[in-house]
């Protein structure tokens, strides 16, 4: 039973996409941090869920592990991410949809490598691919490679100089729309959640438009409680959720151990919201 004291984190990443820890290590860290309910939401893949579930089941006091994924979509030329929760991870149409997403990621990654090579950074594709291993290649892997090879000394600087919109290595996405991703999640019995709405750096009018159109596309919830946010941001997102009749979710968006952000940390939930785990669709292992 979930209570106000239950520690919940419904957005994090593993080495199945661009996280630094294996799925098993993510679960182990969550357990160590006192997380009670966890969703590993790798980018456009559920490749890490089986290993996470197996490891979790072997623990003396396993946590509640929710199936999760973070799907990339395109909205008015912006990358918008939708988290899917509590779905059937063996649903054939969803698996086919995610396979298509991985192909789009690979094509984009190849073009990023070509653009960086033209800018004088040789071997970036091969180096990032080596870091990614079996995971789909992402901009995060390129960022890690450029830092490890000394091209730039900080991951955030990599995006500012090379991978952000308008920079040398930026390649526009070719994702599908929000409605298609939401439909794929719903077909597998899941809940569609707008990920980190304030993280897209949209101005007030555009943020309201995004939330409204996400709802109109069939979206169920939005992340209100984030790993790093100001009190004003929390208030604004809570108001937007209630105004648009969306359930609220909570997630750290953890990728790697760091000083300011960790699994289950600083995720205090305000009252007065309808949370995703309060719906009949909510299921855990």
Image (spheres, rainbow, N blue to C red):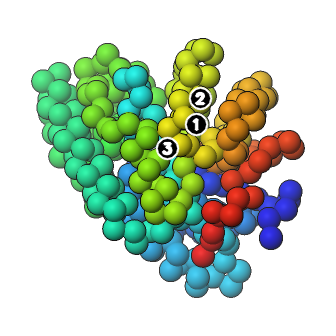
In this image, 128 relative to 189: left or right? left
**Callout in the foreground (3, 2):** 2
Marks 3 and 1: CB-CB under 8 Å? no
Against 153, is 37 above or below? below
State the image coordinates of residue 242 (x, y, percent, origin top left): 75, 35
User: Counting residues from the N terminus, which is met first, the one under dot 3 or under dot 2?
Assistant: 3
Marks 1 and 2: CB-CB under 8 Å? yes
Q: Image point 44% across, 50% down: which residue?
A: 183
User: Counting residues from the N terminus, which is met first, the one under dot 3 or under dot 1?
Assistant: 3
Q: Which residue is mark 2?
A: 212
| Quadrant where the C terminus is found in the figure | bottom right
Q: Nearer the viewer, residue 260 or 201?
A: 201
- The disc placed on residue 144 is none
User: Quick one: SS at disc 1?
Assistant: helix
Q: CA distance from mark 1 to mark 2?
A: 5 Å
Q: Which residue is mark 3?
A: 82
How packed is label 1: few (under 14 Cα within 10 Å), some, or many (20 or more)?
Answer: many
Marks 3 and 2: CB-CB under 8 Å? no
In this image, 107 relative to 273: left or right? left
Q: Which residue is mark 1?
A: 215
Against 93, is 239 above or below? above
Q: Image point 17% across, 46% down: which residue?
A: 126
């Amino acid at each position: 039973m979930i209570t106000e004291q239950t520690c919940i984190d419904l957005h994090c990443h593993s080495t199945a996409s661009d996280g630094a820890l294996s799925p098993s290590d993510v679960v182990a860290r969550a357990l160590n941090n006192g997380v009670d309910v966890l969703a590993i939401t790798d980018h456009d893949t559920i490749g890490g869920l089986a290993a996470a579930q197996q490891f979790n089941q072997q623990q003396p006091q396993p946590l509640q592990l929710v199936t999760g994924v973070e799907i990339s979509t395109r909205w008015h030329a912006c990358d918008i991410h939708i988290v899917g929760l509590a779905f059937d991870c063996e649903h054939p149409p969803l698996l086919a949809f995610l396979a298509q997403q991985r192909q789009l990621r690979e094509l984009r990654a190849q073009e990023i490598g070509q653009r960086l090579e033209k800018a004088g950074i040789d071997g970036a594709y091969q180096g990032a691919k080596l870091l990614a291993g079996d995971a789909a290649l992402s901009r995060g892997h390129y960022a890690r490679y450029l830092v490890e090879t000394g091209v730039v000394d900080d991951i955030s600087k990599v995006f500012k100089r090379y991978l952000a919109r308008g920079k040398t290595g930026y390649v526009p996405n070719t994702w599908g729309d929000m409605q298609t991703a939401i439909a794929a999640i719903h077909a597998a019995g899941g809940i569609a959640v707008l990920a980190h709405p304030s993280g897209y750096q949209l101005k007030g009018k555009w943020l309201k438009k995004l939330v409204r159109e996400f709802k109109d596309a069939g979206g169920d919830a939005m992340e209100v409680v984030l790993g790093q946010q100001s009190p004003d941001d929390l208030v604004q997102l809570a108001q937007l959720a209630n105004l648009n009749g969306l359930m609220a979710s909570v997630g750290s968006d953890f990728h790697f151990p760091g000083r300011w952000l960790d699994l289950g940390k600083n995720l205090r939930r305000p009252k007065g919201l309808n949370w995703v785990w309060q719906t009949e669709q909510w299921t855990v292992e």
